[in-house]
Image (cartoon, helix red, strand yellow):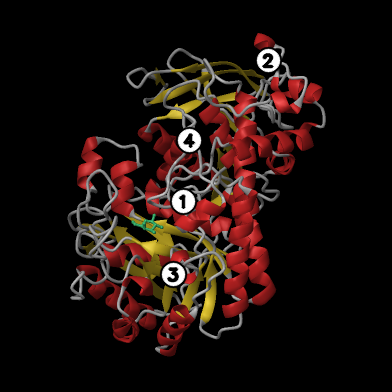
Amino acid sequence: MKRTLGVCYYPEHWPEEIWAQDAARMVDAGLSWVRIGEFAWQRMEPSPGELHWDWLDRAIETLGGAGLKIILGTPTATPPRWMLDKHPDMLPVDAQGRPRRFGSRRHYCFSHLGYRAESRRIARLMAERYGSNKHIAAWQIDNEYACHNTTRSYSDTARTGFRDWLAQKYQSPGALNRAWGNVFWSMDYDDWSQIDLPNLTVTEQNHPHVLDFARYASDQVVAFNRAQVDEIRKCSNAPIIHNYMGRETSFDHWKVGADLDVASWDSYPLGFLSDRVECTPEHKLKFLRQGDPDNQAFHHDLYRAVGRGRWWIMEQQPGPVNWAPYNPAPLPGMARLWAWEAFAHGAETVCYFRWRQAPFAQEQMHAGLLRPDSAAAPALGEAQQVAKEINNLPDVGTAKARVALVFDYQSAWAWEAQPQGADFDMFRLAFAAYRALRRAGLNIDILPPDCADLSPYKFVLAPGIMHLSDPLRAALAAFDGIALIGPRTDTKTENLSIPTPLGPRIDGLDVSVVLTESMPPDDQIKLEGGGCFLHWFEHLEGNETAHLLTKSGQPAIMGGDNLRYLAGWPDDDTFDRIIGYHCDALDLETHALPDGLRIRDTDTHRFVFNYAPKAQKWNGTKIPAAGVHWEPLP
Ligand code: GAL
């Protein structure tokens, strides 16, 4: 497969006279794709039912005629102002009960069926008009579901929808009362109409109530997306994509992804390091202009799995962004490195965001490939270089990993409802495990929580999975490599209560979690041989070997040859040690990579990425700061 580059473009932001020059310049830079349309509802339909396609027809003709393939976005992340007159109750409501108003974007509640019908309608109209247009080579539905904290809305429509959802799930209030444990604090309900959303309570809400609301809210995202997908499929064979986000766990991406053809995500390495990666201040400073060396790779691997092998970068940071607390410029070379890293993880396409920096409105301080005066911004030259390099490199393929990490969104909601320790966060835990695997130079596949076949893998990690699905439970029991599960894995029922007998409950693993402690950042559970557990420690009982002990003699890893339970949250050195000795036992090759140097093997090549701000050596080759190197696999 030939990898390709693209760019996000907003014809409605620019005079029509420059569209053709822009298109020619994109082609000249080696770009193949252009994404348009995703915020232009007002321009398509300035008042209800008054449709203006003429400008979009011409934009598509101009861009497509220049040789670009078009990704057409449905504009449902930005309902025009008139929509609110039609549906005054469609605004999302925050957990404090306040409506979130018009004046930016994503001002809709996923539960609002009137707005869902409007979204279906505009998707249908676009599909009818452009479904067979030869320039439309892909679709994007909406834009970044969940962005700006919009998955969960505490509106009246959400309350009604939630009650119906609960009635279908539990069939009787009695069954719900039992599942939620409502005998506690006299919380029983007699009728669905008594059940509120889990906000504005006096103190902590009942966890299964919160978890069910998270499930309900996620299901609304799935349904909202599916409504548009159904319409587009009727008229178009082009692949349908959504652009997911970094570190966003509020809806089940596996479920949304099942309705789409390709997964994509929006990669802003510097913005994310600034606002959503836990690390030391030294790390933040060292990688300020490069981004965290593992954060992009984690999402590449996650979305490759969500897309069932097909994935893109829909938005790639080109220069400083506008939205993080601090917005430095990338080191020269990073706009190239980020694209190559995505390709090495199997991306089909990388689209930079955006073509030209807008001189107006909210994102005017956000760089593009061009400056606002149309001169080239630094990233344009790097994109051009990548385009040339792609043409010279044969297809490198996407290697299957021998190591896998299970990632589950429901567990993220469960632990958000019931953290038990202020630092317990599902993403953070999974990412800590992932980082350690990357530090060892391993290729990693991320697996969904209902994965039924672990046979391609030798080493599987499943940290923090609150309740194992039946297929995964069976796959673990049958696994002949080493699976390291825990902390907190299979320690709850589906209803987020403690099972008896105590979990985990997998055939062939005689280990139970009998007591759980969480610790503040400065406290640690010291381990035999060095290192420690941070944040979290579970006391284990059972008839299995302790492969690692705490200093006080309690089991830290316990299990048999194939299935083992990890009782705490290892610090980085301990994670490295644990991964090292398991890989040795499994004969998996590891590398001691210097800080900031990362590798990824494809079918034919080994790619080496230097995220460090200074040159580093790999196998005798000097790789400059922000440099990429590739060599045929040994
Ligand atoms: C993304 C979004 C784009 C743009 C970009 C700025 O989250 O999808 O529309 O806002 O961020 O970095």
| Distance in Å between CA atoms under marks 1 and 4 | 13 Å
Residue mark closest to the camera, 2 vs 1: 1
| Distance in Å between CA atoms under marks 2 and 4 | 24 Å
Up the image or down, 302 lies above or below 172; here it is: below
Crowd tier of the residue under label 1, counting other residues whose Cα lies within 10 Å: few below 14, some 14–19, many 20 or above: many
| Distance in Å between CA atoms under marks 3 and 2 | 50 Å
| Distance in Å between CA atoms under marks 2 and 1 | 34 Å
**Dot 1 or dot 3, earlier in sequence:** 3
The numbered mark at residue 187 is: 2
Assign a secondary structure to mark 3: helix
| Distance in Å between CA atoms under marks 1 and 3 | 17 Å
Mark 2 CB within 8 Å of ligand 1: no
Assign a secondary structure to mark 4: loop
* Residue under numbered circle 1: 106
**Dot 3 or dot 4, earlier in sequence:** 3
User: Which amino acid, mark 1?
Assistant: Arg
Residue mark closest to the camera, 2 vs 4: 4
* Residue under numbered circle 3: 43
Q: Are marks 3 and 4 in contact (CB under 8 Å)?
A: no
Residue mark closest to the camera, 3 vs 2: 3
| Distance in Å between CA atoms under marks 3 and 4 | 29 Å
Assign a secondary structure to mark 2: loop
Q: Is residue 70 left or right of residue 11?
A: right
Residue drawn at 52 percent across, 52 percent down? 85
* Residue under numbered circle 4: 94
The numbered mark at residue 331 is: none
